[in-house]
Image (spheres, rainbow, N blue to C red):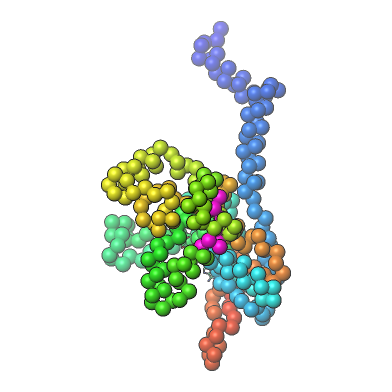
Amino acid sequence: MTSKKNRSDINGSVCLSPSTGVAPQTFAAAIQFFTAAQCLLHQNIQPDDEVTDNSKFDFIIIGGGSAGCVLASRLSEVKKWKVLLIEAGSHPPIESAIPGLTGAVFGTKNDWKYFTENNKVIDQALLNGSVYWPRGKMLGGSSSINAMFYVRGNTYDYQRWYDAGNKDWHPKIVANYFEKAESLQDQKLLKDPSIRNFYGRNGPLTVNTFNGTYRDASKKVLDSWDEIGIKTVDDLNKANVLGSGISRVTAGDGRRASTDYTYLNPVRNRDNLYVLTDTLVTKVLIDKETKVAEGVEVERNGAN
Ligand SMILES: Cc1cc2nc3c(=O)[nH]c(=O)nc-3n(C[C@H](O)[C@H](O)[C@H](O)COP(=O)(O)OP(=O)(O)OC[C@H]3O[C@@H](n4cnc5c(N)ncnc54)[C@H](O)[C@@H]3O)c2cc1C
């Protein structure tokens, strides 16, 4: 005779034993589907280009980060220019592509793992007065590890830079460049003409909204800020970052839109673009007479 308890144990093991029915097949297929889903995020990894000592380039870009990947893409549009991009880190891991897993890249080889110096003023409540300060060490740089909030900045700052004599930083000029970079993809926002016309729609950089941010909790927080005068706006960038609202992000189709993914990867096959990863620039060589930078020294795989 089996006790009640034993009978339920037997049922448990029966449940997990192989069966040819539709239900276990469906569960197995679901697991297989989710396992295979990561392949959708896979990005073709191009091997490094052949670059020998004393090779000559029109431009050498140090660091394939947020700015470096954009520069490499834009400069190599000019076919007669030979462009070299040198990145200390390697290719971003799959965790970088998945927005919800950003934290998993912290503290890995794809992070410089900095800690701030204790300046005896800020962060004194922390151990040693020092803050962990992640920075991306991979193609895409910190755009491959950051929180993806897309904020254009306040035009007041650009105006001040312009007034200080930096004529290329007039807020209108800056806005044109933002538009050129952007590709607004949020279907709901695209239906609103005032937002649709504010953002660029044909640039390489995906601008979208995370689904999760529409949760009830966010709404309650926004409502409470609204009550104390920090008004809810339909779009923070359009509102010149004055007010509160759901943030736009540089991500779409379930993946991060780093500059590696949006700018570098699509042009990686250009003949005039050379990329070296895992290569640390240790010195910029500057001509003593002309004061012009004329080359770099690098450490690659531990060698100079
Ligand atoms: C955790 C985190 C969250 C953030 N969240 C946001 C956000 O939500 N929204 C936002 O707008 N900004 C955010 N930021 C800031 C934003 O990501 C950075 O300001 C921006 O990426 C900086 O771009 P960059 O090109 O100057 O530098 P990086 O993108 O950091 O690129 C520098 C690149 O140079 C490489 N490099 C450095 N030294 C050398 C060398 N000697 N030789 C070769 N290569 C070298 C690095 O490995 C790196 O790839 C965040 C940053 C971090 C770290």
In the picture, measured across the screen, residue 269 lies left or right of residue 125, that is: right
Image height check: is 299 above or below 45? below
Write the start and end of the magenta stretch as one range: 178-185
For the point 44% across and 71% down, which residue is it? 170
Name which residue lies at 53% across and 48% down: 190
Q: Position of residue 177 (x, y in %)?
A: 52, 65
Q: Give the number of callouts.
A: 0
Q: Quadrant of the C terminus?
A: bottom right
Q: Is residue 86 above or below residue 183?
A: below
- In the rendered structure, the answer to whether residue 85 lies left or right of residue 147 reads right
Determine if residue 122 is in view.
yes
Q: Residue furthest top?
A: 1
> Quarter-wise, where is residue 90 in the image?
bottom right
Residue 101 appears in the figure: no
Q: Quadrant of the N terminus?
A: top right
Q: Quadrant of residue 52?
A: bottom right
Q: Relative to residue 172, is residue 98 drawn left or right?
A: right
Q: Residue at x 51, y 62 (%)?
A: 178
Tell me where residue 164 sits by quadrant: bottom left
Q: Position of residue 142 (x, y in %)?
A: 50, 60
Residue 230, x across and y down, in percent: 32, 50
Q: Is residue 35 magenta?
A: no
Residue sitting at 58 percent across and 69 percent down?
71
Q: Is residue 22 above or below residue 69?
A: above
